[in-house]
Amino acid sequence: MNKRAKFSLAILVFGLIIEFSPARSQNGPAPGEVTRPRTVTAQPSQQQQTPAVTPAQQNGRPLSMNKIRARLEEAKRLLKSHPSLTAMTTPAPALSVVTLAVLDDRSSQIHLLTIPKESFLRKGAEMSLTTSLGLNVQLRILRANGVNTAVTVFDAAGRSLVPLVVEYPIERNGALREMAYYTSAHPALLSPEVVKTGQAYIHTMLNLAAKRLKDKGVSIPSNLIDIAERLCIVEHADHIRFRAENRQALFEEILSLYALNELDTYKHSVSFAGAGGMVQMIAPTYQSMRRIHPGVGLNPDFVYGMRNHGNALEAMLLYMLETWKLLSSNPDVAAALSSGMATQTELMAAGYNSNPAKLGGYIRRGGSAWRTLIPRETQMYLQIYRAVDTLIPMKAR
């Protein structure tokens, strides 16, 4: 997985120098590391092709979102109650395996699979396993990325089982830090209803965050909230996958993650630059928002603040508000907006990805070609934004 650049942003706001740097990057995960759920997928060779995967069926139809939620909760309870290697005195076995709950929809039984973590994190790995209920299955790793690893599971007759939840030990320095429970966008779980549910989740959470800010005296323009809604997808779209794969399918996969995990979506997503969570913001940016808007009451703890979607989205909207104040006060930016040389949407997206304080200089030097001067990473970011805007219809506010 490629490493995306981080940009330190110096912005003068109300006489204060504050640093902004929404999160950018993620590399491929090392075993046991907390990783940002962003993956790169290579197409399997002809010899490696697995049977076609269809959504989980019930009476010939994909499982409803309510049915999926019920099964996910059941799987979590089962995982949390099964004998765990974490109780062993020797820590190594506890950290070296993951447990995956899979549904046999024909029998309505949930099976558990114990998988070596090293194999679980190796894209293309295939293994024959026996479930906790004695069923022989074939498992294949489609995308390897920590808690967000996507797999397929088939029984001996070639029938698909539905992966539900992985129990994944997150370690640091050889010690168990947290036991994570997460649902990846496994092909067998995807359906238009799941995608729609994920999109509704982002829309609703942003509206609630904006309302809380308004109640505390900070009004966020609706057009900035609309941009933020698209950025919640753009931020988690891997650039290599964007170039190589079906773009709409990639965006729908991201939306599905929000539906399947809701408040836990991207909870364990941390880039090497320390950017975390749903909005991928680093600590200096977050603390700057707390200093500029003390009355909002953002969580003083950065880690917990990023893990809480409501709190994180408030920080994101505050950051975008301050960025727009900076951009709209710049004469070069104002002239570009007035002439149609630039739009608010692309300037805000570019500013979220890189340094908004430099955009005026790019416009002054480059004129209508200013986009060629911004970092290549940001040029790709704008391409992804435009694709999201084109392919994913959004409700107007």
Image: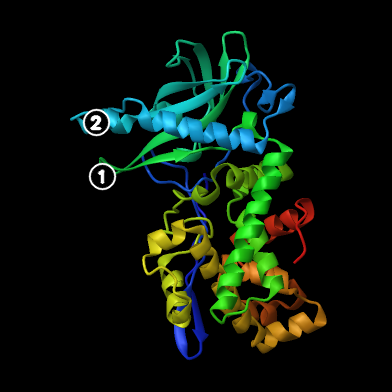
Say if residue 381 shows up in the picture.
Answer: no
Colour style of the rendered protein structure: rainbow
In this image, 144 relative to 208: left or right? left
**x, y (%) of residue 205?**
60, 59
Q: Amino acid at mark 2?
A: Ala
Nearer to us of marks 1 and 2 is 2
The residue furthest right is 339
Which of the 4 quarters of the picture holds residue 175?
top left
Say if residue 225 shows up in the picture.
Answer: yes
Q: Amino acid at mark 1?
A: Asn
Query: Up-down: is 61 above or below 239?
Result: above
Which of the 4 quarters of the picture holds residue 225?
bottom right
* Label 2 element class: helix
Between 349 and 306, the one nearer to me in the picture: 306
The residue furthest top is 157
The residue furthest bottom is 15
Q: Which residue is mark 1?
A: 173
Query: Up-down: is 263 above or below 362?
Result: above
Q: Residue at x 46, y 27 (%)?
A: 100
Q: Residues within 10 Å of mark 1 (few under 14, many from 20)?
A: few
Query: Up-down: is 231 above or below 59?
Result: below
**x, y (%) of residue 218?**
57, 80
**x, y (%) of residue 147?**
46, 39
Q: Which residue is mark 2?
A: 87
Between the residue at mark 1 and the residue at mark 2, the CA separation in whole angstroms equals 19 Å
Between 302 and 3, the one nearer to me in the picture: 302
Asked if the residue at tag 2 contacts the one at tag 1, i.e. Cβ–Cβ closer than 8 Å, the answer is: no
Between 238 and 278, the one nearer to me in the picture: 278
